[in-house]
Amino acid sequence: MKKITYFLAIFMVTLVWVSCEKDDDKATLDLTETVAPVIGDLSHLILHEDHATDTLVILWSEADYGPLSLPDVTYRLYFMHADTVNIMLTETESTAYNITVNSLNNRLINLGFAPDVSADFQFMVSSFIAVEDNGTMLHSDPVTVSLAPFESEDPGEPDVSVLWVPGAYQGWSPATAPNVYSPTSNDIYNGYVHFPADVTSLDFKFTNQPDWNGTNYGDGGEGLLDTDPGASDLSVDEPGTYYMTVNTEALTWSPQVRNYALIGTFNDWSDDEPLTWDNEEMVFTVTLDFVAGDMFKWRANGAWDINYGANDPDDGTLVQGGADIEIPEAGNYTIILNLYALVPTYEIIKN
């Protein structure tokens, strides 16, 4: 039975205040009666080589959905750094996450953080019942922890895993399809897929190999994946750029629209300059006249909550909320944005 039916049944028994949207008759939980999860004390998160095999436990309180408190509340633990990291560590029905000192340390080293240099990281927990778009998502306040990784004798190779995203938009060719990435091989993948405006179909699948001989992930219902070879194709609602989140353990996926544009001093930081999709190179470009000292960056969906600027130091990679990028001298330039990479990159070419 679908969760939404289950919620309505509970409503009839407990007289919970639930609103019903007339557009599609979906029930929506009144979140004013709920309490988000709270992350416990994290002062014990200390990285030291002498305790490399110790287990670090991150605990949080149960989300309170009032009379709708059910045993199938799902939690997602996020690990974030202002410049470079925003990854999901786990998706679980538990209220605890275990990781060894050595494993957490190696993740920081493999993500590029320098040994013996402290950096501030945030942990945040989200909770939901059934699927996210039932309107049941709650978020904890982030908790900041200062961590300094130690130099490991054997941090191992970066354990990045990938999925391929073949679809009608690129000829159903896994070998030439873009990837979504799991930076720590924890079954949780993120990445961009662009569906051009002139495509005749928005259908696609995820595959774990650059061919059709491995595991293929198709449509398992709203927000769900199905590994049956006969499963229907996945699809998005309309052409555009999507930031995909895929969990191959929980068999869930979600697409978030992120249509980027260029903005900067050249247009008084007031308008979004459209980008052109290069289907051959699989990058976005824009060609404009600039004056010396012009600054720019990219933002998504005409808002600033998602924006890309230069890394520090500027190495050609882009980070959320990064620095404005400067044009060194006047002229006509082509600005290139590459989202089809583990870390988005940019290039400036003077014409």
Image: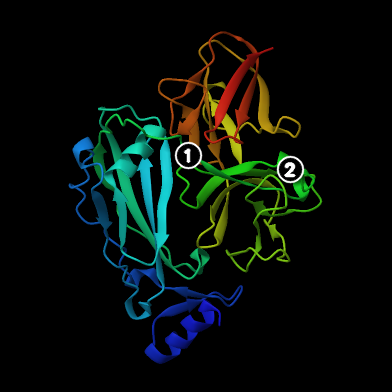
8 sits left or right of 258 in the view: left
Q: CA distance from mark 2 to mark 1?
A: 24 Å
Image coordinates for residue 188, horizontal then vertical, percent: 49, 51
> SS for tag 1?
loop
What residue type is disc 2 on? Pro
Please identify, in this view, whether the residue under mark 2 or under mark 1 is nearer the observer: 2
The residue that disc 2 covers is: 196
The residue that disc 1 covers is: 304
Image coordinates for residue 173, horizontal then vertical, percent: 76, 45
Residue under the point 38% across and 79% down: 68
Name which of mark 2 and mark 1 comes first in the sequence: 2
Q: Residues within 10 Å of mark 1 (few under 14, many from 20)?
A: few
Image coordinates for residue 34, horizontal then vertical, percent: 33, 70
25 sits left or right of 46 in the view: right
The one nearer the camera, 94 or 4, is 94
Tell how many labels.
Answer: 2
